[in-house]
Image (cartoon, helix red, strand yellow):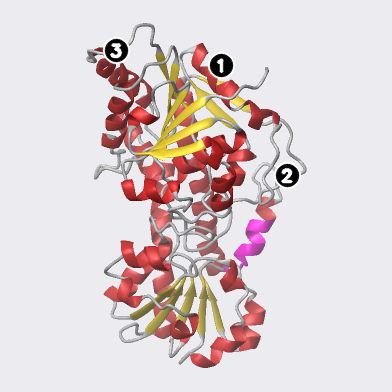
Amino acid sequence: MEERYMKVCVVGTGYVGLTTGVSLAFLGHQVTCVDLDQHKVDMLNGGRCPIYEPGMDELLAEAAGNLTFTTSYSDGVPGADVVFVAVQTPSAPDGSPDLRYLRSAAESVAGNLDHDFTVVVNKSTVPIGSGNWVDAILRESFAQRADRPAGCEFSVASNPEFLREGNAIHDTLFPDRIVIGSDNPRSLEVLNQLYRPIINQTFTAPSFSPRPDDIGAVPLVSTDLASAELIKYAANAFLALKISYANEIGQLAAKVGADITEVTRGMGLDQRIGSRFLQAGVGWGGSCFGKDTKALIATAAEYNYSMPIVQAAREVNDRQRLIAVERLQDELRILKGRKIGLLGVAFKPNTDDLRDSPSLDIANLLLARGARVRLHDPIAGERFKREQPDLAPYFSDTIDALFDDCDAVVLVTEWAQYLELDWSKFVGLMRTPILLDGRHVLDADRMARLGYKYLAIAG
């Protein structure tokens, strides 16, 4: 199939929307990103990225000729071949996704459609059936327009994302697979064409994200709407299950005297299992796993079906944060008045995203038990101070200040900056040099030789 460039509109400039828009513009498509936040739009039009994502600033600069940002749907939707809707879908109190932003976006898109055929793509993670729901909103809103143009057709598709924050550009340009779902064959053809440069890997890779040597043609899964929507939830839930399973085995390993890193290494060498997402530690966080597992359970409940395995994965993950605190209490006996340092507030390295970060729960649990808490992060500090005003007074701008007079330090986020610390420099600053490795990434023997009492979350 011959490649051709398209006019694309992306609604929403969060992690998913911004990465999608900038990457497609880099590939040569003409992209307009719509966001109602004027400050964010002004930043992006000025070449400044509102999120921390490695390589995004560079890609933004390289794609600038094909990329514009606006607060107006009328600047992006008219004439677009494809409109991606990538707005937030936070969890409602009952666990189901809150779809108010998706509804608003769909209504605004419908009010500006004028092309002979436009594919409106759900890029946000949405519950099964949302494609049909969005299609109904589009058609109802479009029918109410007094100025609706003749010959304008549109169709809804699902194109779930599988991005890892911190690796979003690589995962977009060199994905494991691309999933597209629609009940309209013409929509599938348009999206197949849109992604042809990635499928065939015919583009010149950016210098900061070279093409992997082993990549070939990228598999394209072309399916119906419901299947595409379920693929996203099923994939994220399975990854969450793997992490929670490793953590559950880790607690058993601690009781029987086994080394969980050796156990998971032995498991991961089995090609049926694989080594990824088997790292025991304080558990998963971020915007996806918690929200998506909760939404999957809520969706199943609508059909009078329970998902005890997925529910158990959530419970195990919550327990890991409490276990970190209990390990410190077992060692220190009394937490009241103790100074505890937490290294890392972002939920994972290479991002400043704090959503569902284990560090936040651990800090609050420690404070509730009377501990004096200090936190540090090499990248997420400013965002932490803005988004966590109750915890902001406990943030240390320097690592030295965190270690000074500490009774224990917990490695929560495995930033490279922490792994490469001159740990020998800090042991003398602590009142009691207790080090809890929340990610099983430090060399226990080396830490012991340096004078730390090394503890791990699991065996």
Mark 1 falls on what kind of element? helix
Task: Write down the residue under mark 2.
Answer: 212
Mark 1 touches mark 2? (CB < 8 Å): no
Q: Amino acid at mark 2?
A: Pro
What residue is at 49 percent from the left and 29 percent from the top? 159
Q: Amino acid at mark 3?
A: Arg
Going from N to C along the chain, the mark reached first, 3 or 1, is 3
Checking the image for residue 148, the label placed there is: 3
Q: Position of residue 123 (x, y in %)?
A: 44, 33
- What stretch of residues is rendered in magenta? 256-265
Foreground: 9 or 373?
A: 9
Which quadrant would the C terminus be assigned to in this image? bottom right
Q: Position of residue 394 (x, y in %)?
A: 34, 77
Checking the image for residue 189, the label placed there is: 1
Q: Is residue 65 left or right of residue 107?
A: right
Q: Position of residue 98 (x, y in %)?
A: 28, 38
3 vs 1, front mark: 3
Q: Residue furthest right?
A: 213
| Mark 1 Cα-neighbour bin, 10 Å: few <14, some 14–19, many ≥20 | few
Mark 2 falls on what kind of element? loop
Q: Is residue 320 visible?
A: yes
What residue is at 59 percent from the left and 43 percent from the top? 171
Q: CA distance from mark 2 to mark 3?
A: 47 Å
Checking the image for residue 153, the label placed there is: none
